[in-house]
Image: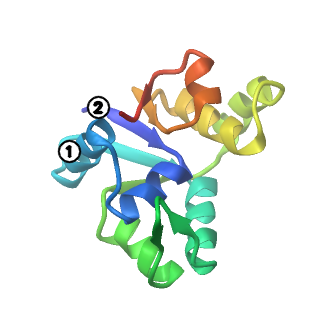
Amino acid sequence: MPTYTADAVSLLVYLVDGLPSHADQVFAEAEAGETVIQAPSTALAEVLYSVSRDKDVRGVTLSGSPDEARQALIGNGPISVASIDEAELAEYASVVGEFSIHDGLIVASHRARGTDAIITTDGVISDSDYETVWE
C-alpha cells in the first residue's frame, strides 16, 4: 500500500479543503483506506498551534478548536501519527545541516519510515531531490 509523509502545510490546506488535484487525490485515497498518510508529531503540533491562533490558510480562516482539528485529522480522518523516535532522530542527525528544524524532521520521518513521497509545497524539500506530491 502506498505510504506518504505529510507536512503541516498540507494538513492545514486539507482542513480548509484547498488541496490541489494531485495532493487531494492522495488524501481521498487515504480516506478510502487505499493509501496511508503519516504525519510526524511535530507537524501535527504545528497544525494544532495554527488552529489555536485562528491562522488564515489560502484565504480561509481556520475555525474550530485544536481538538476538533485533531479529530478531523487523526480521530476521524486519514492521518496516522508518526511519532519521532530514535530512527527519526538518527535520520535527522544526518540531514540537520541541510534543512530547517521543520523540514529536517519531515525529511527524517520520510527517510526513516521509507514512505513513497512527501506531501508538501516546500521547494527546499523538492529541490533536494526528495519525491514530493502537490500539484
User: Earlier along the polypeptide chain: callout 2 or callout 1?
Assistant: 2
The residue indicated by pointer 1 is 29
Q: Residue at x 28, y 48 (%)?
A: 27
What's the amino acid at mark 1?
Glu
Q: Secondary structure at mark 1?
A: helix
The residue indicated by pointer 2 is 2
Q: For this rendering, which residue is in front, 57 or 11?
A: 57
Residue 28: x percent and y percent?
A: 21, 49
In the image, residue 44 above or below residue 40: below
Residue 35: x percent and y percent?
A: 25, 40
In the image, residue 120 above or below residue 15: above
Looking at the figure, which quarter contains the N terminus? Answer: top left
User: Which residue in the rendered view is the most extreme toward the bottom?
Assistant: 65
Question: Are the residues at dot 2 and dot 1 in contact (C-beta closer than 8 Å)?
Answer: yes
Q: Residue at x 69, y 29 (%)?
A: 91
Left or right: 88, with 57 as reference point = right
Left or right: 91, with 40 as reference point = right
Q: Quadrant of residue 31?
A: bottom left
Q: Residues within 10 Å of mark 1 (few under 14, many from 20)?
A: some
Residue 129: x percent and y percent?
A: 56, 15
What's the amino acid at mark 2?
Pro
Q: Quadrant of residue 22?
A: top left
Q: Residue at x 39, y 64 (%)?
A: 15
Left or right: 38, with 2 as reference point = right
